[in-house]
Amino acid sequence: MNSSHLNIKNWTRHNLREWFQNNQKSSSGNQSYRADQVFNWLYQKRAQSFDQMLNIGRETRKMLEENFYISSQKIADSLHSQDGSIKYRILLEDGNSIESVFLPHKNHNTICVSSQAGCGMGCDFCMTARMGLIRNLKPAEIIDQVFTVLQELKENKKIRNIVFMGMGEPFHNYNNLMQALEILTDEHGFNFSHRRITVSTSGLLPKIRRFGQEKIKANLAVSLNGVSDEVRTKLMPVNKAYNLEKLIKACSEYPLESRKRITFEYILIRDLTDSLQDAKGLIRLLHGLKFKINLIPYNSTADGKYQAPSPQQARRFQKYLLDHQIVAPLRISKGQDIQGACGQLAVGAE
């Protein structure tokens, strides 16, 4: 690979169509449809070289080889959980690492992908925050996580859901996120249903508003984790800039399709966010919105700063919400024994 070559997986099909139009020979007619063929080879047939793209002429393949390369990722190591989850540490081209997690469920499988190496949001309960923000991931580095995990899995294991809940704040890497989503949902690309993709944010309001206006769609999840500004600011510094009143207003204005809801993620931390008073506060706070709540018992980390609630208290909290006709599944996080659960992802550089 020549250092001047471009990673073709950083390009949307629209970008590539324009490139073909601008680089075609005048005598050969409009070649932009070649972008559709290239995408089909890359994302549906998973070609790893331009030579494999047999219905594309030799001259065109040569032109592609002279300008682009097809990226792939290396797995530095993987950890297998007793619940079937697998955490992959993936090595990036610059020597940094990220983590992606395969999550098996009874009727479907999910892959949790990272959008950044590290994270700059500083959430107090999250191990990734302690890394700080190293850098944004490029679209190819986001997409290749899906490739890499699929290649590692046995053929009978298919991915139904993709969740942007790994390392990083997706909306901090907005443009690259949107390019990755465009490629993932492109009918010539991965052709993944936007209804099966969820993007989780800590609450960056300008980007929530912008995301709601995009043609490329995905489900929105918002990390809430506190029902008062005092508690939420303690856990999530982003609350200083965008407090609960502003956050709830933005969510109330978010455009939703008729059967869609915003998911609010709420971490249950012993003696901080898990009381029945907190449950009542949650109902008051979200009144009038179309929503569901994912209740996530805190996943303990080595420093012991916070503790998980007792199973009984977690169920009491959930029951209070269910009794008030609120959809509130209790998510017992998978991969806890391999530090692969919510808030536990953290790596260093090679």
Image: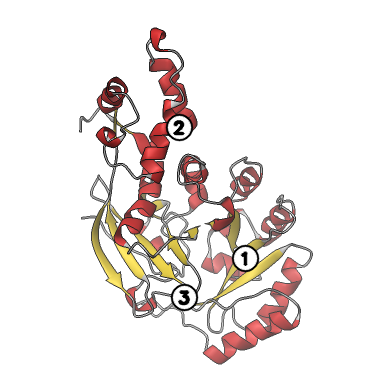
Mark yes or no: residue 133 visible.
no
Foreground: disc 1 or disc 3: 3
When the figure is inspected, residue 50 is found, relative to residue 121, above or below; the finding is above
When the figure is inspected, residue 277 is found, relative to residue 143, above or below; the finding is below
Badge 3, how many Cα within 10 Å: few under 14, some, many 20+?
some
x and y, in percent, of residue 99 in the image: 34, 60
Which labelled disc corresponds to residue 36? 2
Q: How is the image coloured?
A: secondary structure
Residue type beneath disc 2: Asp
Q: Residue at x 44, y 77 (%)?
A: 299
Foreground: disc 2 or disc 3: 2
Counting residues from the start of the chain, the first of labels 2 and 3 encountered is 2
Where disc 1 sits, the SS reads strand
When the figure is inspected, residue 348 is found, relative to residue 28, above or below; the finding is below
Q: Residue at x 72, y 49 (%)?
A: 255
Q: Quadrant of the N terminus?
A: top left
Counting residues from the start of the chain, the first of labels 1 and 3 encountered is 1
Return the residue at label 3: 333
Question: Nearest the camera: 80 or 95?
Answer: 80
Question: Is the residue under label 3 in contact with that under label 1 (CB below 8 Å)?
Answer: no
Which labelled disc corresponds to residue 264? 1
Q: Quadrant of the C terminus?
A: bottom left
